[in-house]
Each structure stands twice: as structure tokens, then as C-alpha cells.
Image: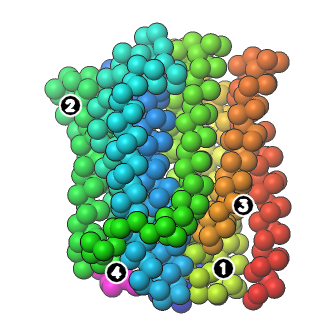
């Protein structure tokens, strides 16, 4: 493999650079999403449809704790990208050391309290009735591995900030492949049921952590930290926190959304509706992988060039990313509108779930062609270190619009009101994001170019 330097982010053509960054990111997200997708299929067919709902209850809790690592990673990586762009290697190293310390302190604390209040947390997130026991089994085992997942998510963003997307892709692929192999062994061969599914997931996190650790200890990484870099620095922690809080707030809102959705749907349609939402949720993770990949590829390029004061390149990066992501989102939209029932049948043989899910899926993905504007717009402000607009735009869709809608519309339209909330919130959030992104480009990129 040719030697790759972070300086390439400031010199190579934007289109070529974005593809080089986005393709590995997309492949990594695809493999990770396929892992979640196939894991759900395995669980649905080998354990039962209730097990799908049980995992859906646990995911927002475990993902929120892991998102502490992601938020610290993205917040710190924004600093690292801009520091490398400005040739400030000392700040980049200190930031990375602080990221590791913060991730360990916060995630271990959260796991402790997550296990302490297990019997209260699971019902709160919709783990009721027949769902409770399998959810509890899965939750306890998966939480053991969550600190390792958090370190992986943090480390992955730093690898990308160094301009090494292929290694970031490998970091995402290794645990995904490992999880699928272990799923087959633990669930199908050894018949461990929910415990098998949980241990397969936890052990796969350890595989990922081993690879991330190897990368930073090897000559592939430019960031060679020592013990002095682990001591927390107030200004760096503050900057990591302000930028990382954007990602954490996003995941917090996602977790709250799961809490409301699982409970509302359980009350309106029982376990069938919760399972339908679990399937649609997996498709939200899987189907949009190329759009998320473009967004991930966009972040280090925008951050590096902004740090280097190459504003014309930043502007071109925004519009190239929007073009690529919107085209890919439209292809995803067409696929999901045409084949929702065939997709549903991959997950389950439950007749009621198959009957309900296709209509729900069409509602959820109705505004998909325009979601790239939301994602790229919020990511841009995060990449350049503007935490407040990044936070507000990130929260606009789910926090300010979607959650109020799912609390209000079902009073008038029943369960249909829940599904109608998706395209309405996507459309409104896109309009708001487009306005602020356009204003930012005109004010700061055009005038400074």
C-alpha cells in the first residue's frame, strides 16, 4: 500500500479525494450495516421475531454509551484535522491522548450505572411483556463490550482524520465479519440463543479494539503519543466537549426517539408494531450507507482545508459532497419504494409483521432524496469547529420536529401518525439546514476566498 499523508487532504483534486475518502467509509459502513442486518435476520429466523424486538430495545442504550466514544472521536478529530492542516502536530498529539482518557472515564462509568439499573432501563425503552427477558439477557452481556466499542469508534474517526480511510474501513469490517461468524457458531451450531447473539457481538468489539490498537502502535499512524499526552488539558477537553456534544446530543435524541417509538408503537399495535419498527430501523442503518460514507469522507477534507484557510476548496468540497450524496440517496429511495415487501420477508416469516412493515417502510423513506442536505450541512459546521450551529442543526430533525410530531399526530391519525412524522420532519429539517448552510457559504467562504 502506498504511503498516505494527511497533507494529501489539502492538495489532491476534491472529486478524486472525496471518492478516495468516501468509498472506504461507505464500504466500512456497508459491512457494519450488513452485520446488523444479517444479525437481525439470523436472530429472527433462529430465535424468533420477539428477539428482534428485544435487540431493538437494547440498541439505543448500548449505542448511546458507545456514542460517548464516537462524540469524543469526532469532536477531537475535528481539532486534529485542523491542527494537522495548520502544521500544529503538538496540539494533534495532545488532543488524541485526551480523547483516550475521556473515553475510558466516561464509558466505564456509564456501563456501571447501566448495569446497576438494568431492571428499570429495559422496560423504559419498551422491553415489556414477552420482550423483557430476552432483552435483559442481551443487554447485560453486550454492555460488557461497550467500552471497547467506544474506543473503536473514537479511534476510527482519528484514523480518518489522519487521511487513512482504508484503515478506518478495515476497522469497521473486522468486527462485522467476526460477529457474523460467531453468530452462526453460537446461535445456530451451539444453540446458545440470545446469549449467543450477545456474546458474538461483544467478542466482535474486542476484535475491532485489537486492530485499532495495532494501528496506532504501528508505523502506519502519524500520531505517536506518550504518557504526557494522556493528562487532561482544560482547553482541549472544552473544545472536544463542545464539538463532540453535537454527536452525543444526536445519539441521545436517537435513544430518546427509540424510547418514545417503542412505547408508543407497543401501546398502539403491540409487539408486531415494535418488530416492524425494528426492521425499518435496520434498513435506516443499512440502506443509507453510501450517504453516510460520503458524509464521513467529507468531514476530514472540509476540516483540513478550513484549517489551512483554503476556503475555495472547502466550498467545492461541500457542493461535491452534496451532489454525490443526493444522487446516492435517490437510488436508495427508488429501491425501497419498489421492494419493501421482499425486504421485509428477509427478516421474518411472521405474517402480521410482513403485512404491516412495507407500508411503514414507504412512509419512513418517503423524503430520502433530500436527506443529504441535512447530513452534509450539520457535518460542515462540526468539521470547521462551529459547535453551536452544528448542534442546533443536528437536533432540528429529531429533537425539535420529529419527537413533537410522534407525540401529537397519533392523537389524530393513530399509528399512521407515527409513520407520517418521518417525511414531514425530514422535509422541514432539510429546508432549515439548507438556509443556514447557504448563508454560511455566502458569508464566510465566498467573501474569504
Residue 96 visible in the current orientation: yes
How far apart in space, not on screen, are marks 1 and 4 (Cα)? 24 Å
Which of 40/81 is in front? 81
Report the residue marked by disc 1: 314
Question: x, y percentage for residue 338?
Answer: 64, 38
Where is residue 387, by image quadrant?
bottom right
In the image, which disc is placed on residue 222? 4
Between residue 240 and residue 46, name the one nearer to us. Answer: 240
Q: CA distance from mark 3 to mark 1?
A: 17 Å
Name which residue lies at 72% across and 37% down. 402
Q: Which mark is residue 186?
A: 2
Across and down, in percent, residue 192 comes to 21, 24
Magenta stretch in the rendered image: 1-6
* Residue depicted at 25% across the width and 63% down the height: 213
Q: CA distance from mark 2 to mark 4?
A: 39 Å
- Label 1 vs label 4, nearer the camera: 4
The residue sitting at 24% across, 79% down in the picture is 219
Amino acid at each position: 500500500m502506498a504511503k498516505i499523508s494527511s497533507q494529501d487532504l489539502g492538495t489532491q483534486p476534491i472529486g478524486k479525494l472525496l471518492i478516495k475518502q468516501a468509498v472506504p467509509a461507505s464500504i466500512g459502513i456497508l459491512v457494519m450495516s450488513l452485520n446488523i442486518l444479517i444479525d437481525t435476520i439470523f436472530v429472527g429466523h433462529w430465535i424468533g421475531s420477539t428477539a428482534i424486538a428485544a435487540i431493538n430495545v437494547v440498541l439505543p442504550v448500548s449505542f448511546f454509551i458507545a456514542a460517548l466514544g464516537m462524540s469524543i472521536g469526532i469532536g477531537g478529530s475535528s481539532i486534529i484535522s485542523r491542527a494537522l492542516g495548520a502544521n500544529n502536530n503538538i496540539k494533534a498529539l495532545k488532543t488524541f491522548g485526551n480523547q483516550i482518557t475521556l473515553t475510558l472515564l466516561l464509558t466505564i462509568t456509564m456501563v456501571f450505572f447501566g448495569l446497576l439499573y438494568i431492571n428499570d432501563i429495559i422496560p423504559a425503552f419498551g422491553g415489556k411483556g414477552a420482550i423483557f427477558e430476552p432483552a435483559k439477557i442481551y443487554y447485560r452481556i453486550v454492555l460488557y463490550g461497550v467500552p471497547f466499542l467506544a474506543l473503536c469508534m473514537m479511534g476510527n474517526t482519528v484514523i480518518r482524520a489522519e487521511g487513512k480511510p482504508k484503515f478506518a474501513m478495515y476497522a469497521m469490517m473486522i468486527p462485522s465479519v467476526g460477529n457474523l461468524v460467531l453468530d452462526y457458531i453460537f446461535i445456530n451450531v451451539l444453540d446458545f440463543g440470545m446469549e449467543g447473539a450477545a456474546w458474538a457481538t461483544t467478542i466482535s468489539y474486542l476484535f475491532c479494539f485489537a486492530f485499532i490498537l495495532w494501528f496506532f502502535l504501528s508505523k502506519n499512524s502519524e500520531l505517536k503519543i506518550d504518557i504526557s499526552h494522556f493528562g487532561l488539558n482544560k482547553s482541549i477537553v472544552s473544545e472536544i466537549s463542545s464539538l463532540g456534544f453535537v454527536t452525543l446530543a444526536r445519539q441521545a435524541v436517537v435513544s430518546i426517539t427509540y424510547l418514545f417509538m417503542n412505547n408508543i408503537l407497543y401501546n398502539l399495535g403491540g409487539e408486531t408494531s415494535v418488530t416492524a419498527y425494528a426492521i425499518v430501523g435496520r434498513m435506516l442503518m443499512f440502506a443509507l450507507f453510501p450517504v453516510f460514507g460520503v458524509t464521513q469522507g467529507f468531514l476530514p477534507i472540509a476540516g483540513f482545508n478550513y484549517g489551512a484557510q483554503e476556503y475555495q476548496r472547502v466550498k467545492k468540497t461541500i457542493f461535491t459532497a452534496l451532489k454525490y450524496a443526493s444522487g446516492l440517496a435517490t437510488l436508495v429511495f427508488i429501491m425501497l419504494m419498489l421492494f419493501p415487501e421482499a425486504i421485509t420477508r428477509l427478516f421474518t416469516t411472521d405474517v402480521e409483521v410482513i403485512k404491516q412493515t412495507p407500508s411503514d417502510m414507504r412512509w419512513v423513506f418517503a423524503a430520502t432524496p433530500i436527506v443529504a442536505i441535512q447530513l452534509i450541512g450539520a457535518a460542515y459546521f462540526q468539521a470547521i469547529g462551529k459547535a453551536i450551529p452544528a448542534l442546533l442543526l443536528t437536533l432540528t430533525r429529531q429533537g425539535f420536529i420529529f419527537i413533537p410530531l410522534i407525540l401529537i399526530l397519533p392523537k389524530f391519525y393513530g399509528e399512521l401518525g407515527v409513520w407520517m412524522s418521518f417525511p414531514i420532519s425530514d422535509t422541514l429539517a432539510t429546508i432549515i439546514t439548507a438556509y443556514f448552510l447557504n448563508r454560511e457559504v455566502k458569508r464566510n467562504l465566498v467573501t474569504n476566498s
